[in-house]
Image (spheres, helix red, strand yellow):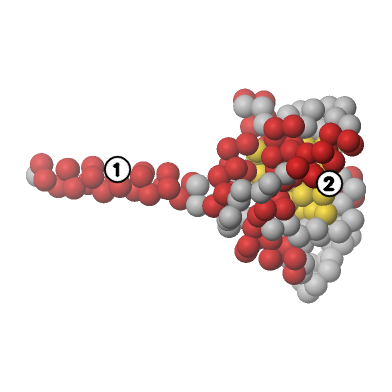
Amino acid sequence: MRPFYIVLLASTLGLFTQTDGLAQSQVNWMSLEEAVVAQKNEPRKIVMDVYTQWCGPCKMMMANTFTNPDVIAYLNENFYAVKFDAESKAPVNFKGRTFENPGYKEGVRGRNSAHQLSRELRVSAYPTLVYFDEKAEVIAPISGYKTPGQLEMYLKFFAQHFTPGVQQGEWEEFRDNFVPSFR
């Protein structure tokens, strides 16, 4: 009887070890509502990937950038990562308001109606990464496909150098001197 328990315990511990490894093999995506709640317990900035189902560059970013081990590790350690379909029908509660997509049409292939939240965040192209501060206030929406090295510059600026009132010149100096390290 005893060997059975040891095997069971060993396989259970092995599962936990594998699960911990898997946690860093992908971005820990969450909803905006979950990220705002998490900020109350552990303040961090939020980065929201605003995408659509039909967007080719969005799919490329998911396949090429958000699977990069350096991007995954940095996002999971420094941000709450939110994935948001800008044409979804799901309501989103944010800052005391409920945002919906009243023009959503079920079964439409390709483009659908834009979600009210994407309009509120001033998203006009896909993909767009919207950065929020530790109080869920929008810092900036940044549009366009980003490689891991290009994304690294924004992630590190917003995580390490951004403060309210930062001047354009500070960003430009950071950008001009930035050397990417993500592979």
Indicate the quadrant containing the C terminus: top left, top right, bottom left or bottom right.
bottom right
Rendering quarter of residue 171 = top right
Q: Position of residue 116 (x, y in %)?
A: 87, 50
Q: 93 or 25: nearer the eye?
A: 25
Q: Which residue is mark 2?
A: 141
Rendering quarter of residue 96 = top right
Q: Is residue 116 something that shows in the picture?
A: no
Q: Which residue is depicted at the point 57% across and 49% down?
A: 70
Pointer 1 local density, CA inside 10 Å: few below 14, some 14–19, many at least 20: few
Pointer 2 local density, CA inside 10 Å: few below 14, some 14–19, many at least 20: some
The disc placed on residue 160 is none
Q: Which residue is depicted at the point 62% across and 43% down?
A: 75
Residue type pointed to by label 1: Leu
Mark closer to the chain start, 2 or 1 = 1
Q: CB of mark 2 within 8 Å of CB of mark 1?
A: no
Residue type pointed to by label 2: Pro
Q: Position of residue 118 (x, y in %)?
A: 85, 50
In the picture provided, is 164 more to the left or to the right than 147?
right
Rendering quarter of residue 45 = top right
Q: Which residue is mark 1?
A: 13
Residue farthest front in this picture: 177
C-alpha separation, residue under disc 2 versus residue under disc 1: 42 Å
Q: 59 or 152: nearer the eye?
A: 152
Total number of numbered labels?
2
